[in-house]
Amino acid sequence: MMVRAADFIKQVVSSTLYRPDGAVETTRDPAVWTLAHRGYSGSGRLDVWAYRTQADALRAGAVLAMEAGMDEDPQCAELFAAGRWSEVMERYEELSPEGHLLRVQAAFLQVDDGKIDNG
């Protein structure tokens, strides 16, 4: 199976401007959804993975949290069973030592001319 950049690059909200007259201006830019993890493995390094969708990244983050010991936390197991991926990841960070993180966010692509060749 061939993986294409176009499968990962999406137009994601990069800013929202609320004007005094009530108008709202939203800007979208090309980005990929990422999962970032810093934990016990890798001597504190930050590992980052790219996913096709935000939902895929959130689910992968919740699975990683469970594999990292959160399956032993009853509250986390309940959140995971309910498909509440963000809350599983938040619980991981809450119970982990300072400096550990597990986050999903958009990584915006920096391009010179504002265009990306998805071909």
Image (cartoon, helix red, strand yellow):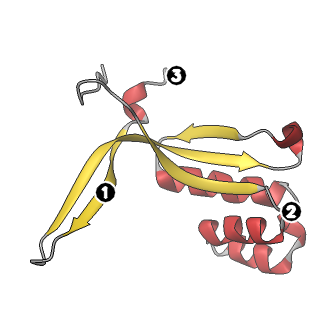
Please, what secondary structure does the residue beneath circle 1 have? strand
Check the image and report above or below for 14 versus 98: above
Q: Is residue 45 left or right of residue 111?
A: right
Pointer 3 and pointer 1: residues touching (CB < 8 Å)? no
Quadrant assignment, res 88: bottom right
- Report which residue position mark 1 lands on: 15
Residue 23, horizontal then vertical, whole percent? 12, 72
Q: Which residue is mark 3?
A: 1
- Seen in the picture, residue 39 relative to 111 is either above or below; the reply is below
Amino acid type indicated by mark 1 = Ser
Please name the residue that numbered disc 2 is placed on: 97
Task: Tell me the amino acid under the disc marked 2.
Answer: Pro
Q: Secondary structure at mark 2?
A: loop
Q: Residue furthest front?
A: 20
Q: Residue at x 72, y 48 (%)?
A: 37
- Kindly identify the amino acid type of the residue bearing the numbered disc 3: Met
